[in-house]
Image (cartoon, rainbow, N blue to C red):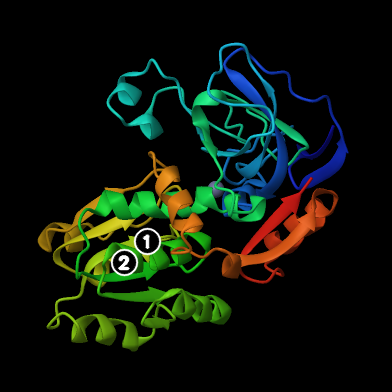
């Protein structure tokens, strides 16, 4: 089969590789669409340590079932599916408690951090366990289904934050995850969402996604907007979708006393942390990792038209042009939004 292979850091090659063989508990998915994640782009140069070559990346995918392992039931060849980006063991302490995203020995599709290598979906075929599959509703396209993973990550962050009825929220970072958080906050009952980003086009997209205010991090209107709705207190909940010292600092600084800060972005493994602010303002700082069962809800929202994704797709391109799109994304020359590759 053809695949886009990260042969060494910064070198992606579109070439023939053997198709994956499936184990008894796996299915072979013929990939119809796979989105390029920011973590794939950042993994390209080795800086994150999570894409050690050789590797086929890609974990935001959809396709049809081409082959079914002997121990997999409930699926038929040709079924349209998407799948969780986390491959988790079923016999795990965390999984049994419903916390499969935290399970020991979990693996992420299209990732190789050193202790495992699991090839992903920038290829004609990918092997995945049957228990991480989700059927795609008829009226949802493969390209739309390739956006479900990112939307589910955003919904997990919202679920982690607890009730949002009438609350005032800040979202730092209006990339794919940030935009989905903004949209899903609207659906979840937040009364007001402000967004911060450095990029003008992203700020525009944040407004279209439902943010009432979108400006650059240093803009005083951000604090004014949040405070004018809260009697000067600040955001009830901040969602941080970047993961740098400056953005975490902003998310914490604009949260009200006793409020919550949900950390989703983790571009930088370590940051300067405003400890005194968090302690003296009694903030609840919550980490949000991947997805924990949010797929069904996102697929429902897509099927019903309550959640839109097409406006977040920057380009749909053939997989053989993948290396060029990665280069553009890496050099920040691509339009904002998701690039989806089609094998
Ligand atoms: Zn991702």
Q: Is residue 126 visible?
A: yes
Instruction: Please say if the residues under marks 2 and 1 sit with CB atoms less than 8 Å apart.
Output: yes
Above or below 205: residue 76: above
Q: What secondary structure is found at the residue carrying circle 2?
A: helix
State the residue position of label 2: 251
Q: Please tell me how many numbered marks the rendered image carries.
A: 2
Where residue 260 sits, quadrant-wise, is bottom left
Q: Nearer the viewer, residue 108 or 23?
A: 23
Give the quadrant of residue 236.
bottom left
The numbered disc on residue 159 is none
> Dot 1, crowdedness within 10 Å: few (<14), some or many (≥20)?
many
Q: Position of residue 123 (x, y in %)?
A: 76, 38
| 30 sits to left or right of 282 | right
Secondary structure under the numbered disc 1 in the rendered image: strand
User: In this picture, is 67 found above or below 112?
Assistant: above
**Which residue appears at 52% of the width and 76% of the height?**
205
Residue 125: horizontal and vertical position, in percent? 74, 33
Q: Is residue 327 above or below residue 251?
A: above
Quarter of the image for residue 31 reads top right
Which residue is farthest right?
Answer: 16
In the picture, the quarter occupied by the N terminus is top right
Name the residue located 60 percent from the left edge and 20 percent from the top edge: 26
Q: Is residue 290 visible?
A: no
Q: Quadrant of the C terminus?
A: top right
Q: Specify few, some or many for label 2: CA neighbours under 10 Å numbering under 14, 14-19, or 20 or more.
A: many
Expressed as whole percent of the image width and height from the top left, the position of residue 9 reads 73, 43
As measured in the structure, the alpha-carbon distance from the residue carrying label 2 to the one carrying label 1 is 6 Å
Label 1: which residue? 240
**Relative to the observer, which residue lies in front, 197 or 248?**
197
Residue 214 pos. (x, y %):
41, 81
Furthest-front residue in this view: 138
Q: Does residue 283 appear to the left or right of 216 in the view shown?
A: left
């Amino acid at each position: 089969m053809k695949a886009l292979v990260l042969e060494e850091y910064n070198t992606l090659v579109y070439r023939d590789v053997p198709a994956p063989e499936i184990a008894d508990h796996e299915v072979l998915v013929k990939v119809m669409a796979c989105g390029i994640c920011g973590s794939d782009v950042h993994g390209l140069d080795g800086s994150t340590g999570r894409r050690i070559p050789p590797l086929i990346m890609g974990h935001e995918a959809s396709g049809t079932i081409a082959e079914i392992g002997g121990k997999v039931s409930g699926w038929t060849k040709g079924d349209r599916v998407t799948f969780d980006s986390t491959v988790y063991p079923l016999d795990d302490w965390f999984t049994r408690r419903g916390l499969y995203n935290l399970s020991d020995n979990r693996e992420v599709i299209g990732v190789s951090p050193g202790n495992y290598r699991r090839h992903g979906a920038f290829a004609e075929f990918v092997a995945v366990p049957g228990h991480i599959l989700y059927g795609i509703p008829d009226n949802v396209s493969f390209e739309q289904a390739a956006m479900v993973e990112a939307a589910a990550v955003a919904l997990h962050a919202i679920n982690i934050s607890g009730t949002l009825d009438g609350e005032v929220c800040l979202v730092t970072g209006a990339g794919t995850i940030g935009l989905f958080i903004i949209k899903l906050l609207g659906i979840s009952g937040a009364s007001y969402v402000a967004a911060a980003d450095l990029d003008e086009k992203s700020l525009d997209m944040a407004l279209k996604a439902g943010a009432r205010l979108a400006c650059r991090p240093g803009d005083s209107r951000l604090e004014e907007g949040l405070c004018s709705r809260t009697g000067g207190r600040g955001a009830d909940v901040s969602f941080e979708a970047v993961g740098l010292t400056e953005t975490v600092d902003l998310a914490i600084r604009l949260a009200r006393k006793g409020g919550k800060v949900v950390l989703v972005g983790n571009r930088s493994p370590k940051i300067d942390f405003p400890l005194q602010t968090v302690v003296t303002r009694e903030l609840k700082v919550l980490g949000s990792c991947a997805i924990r069962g949010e797929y069904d809800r996102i697929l429902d929202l897509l099927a019903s038209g309550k959640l839109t994704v097409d406006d977040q797709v920057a380009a749909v391109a053939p997989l053989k042009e993948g290396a060029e799109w990665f280069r553009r994304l890496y050099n920040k020359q691509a339009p904002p939004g998701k690039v989806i590759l089609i094998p």
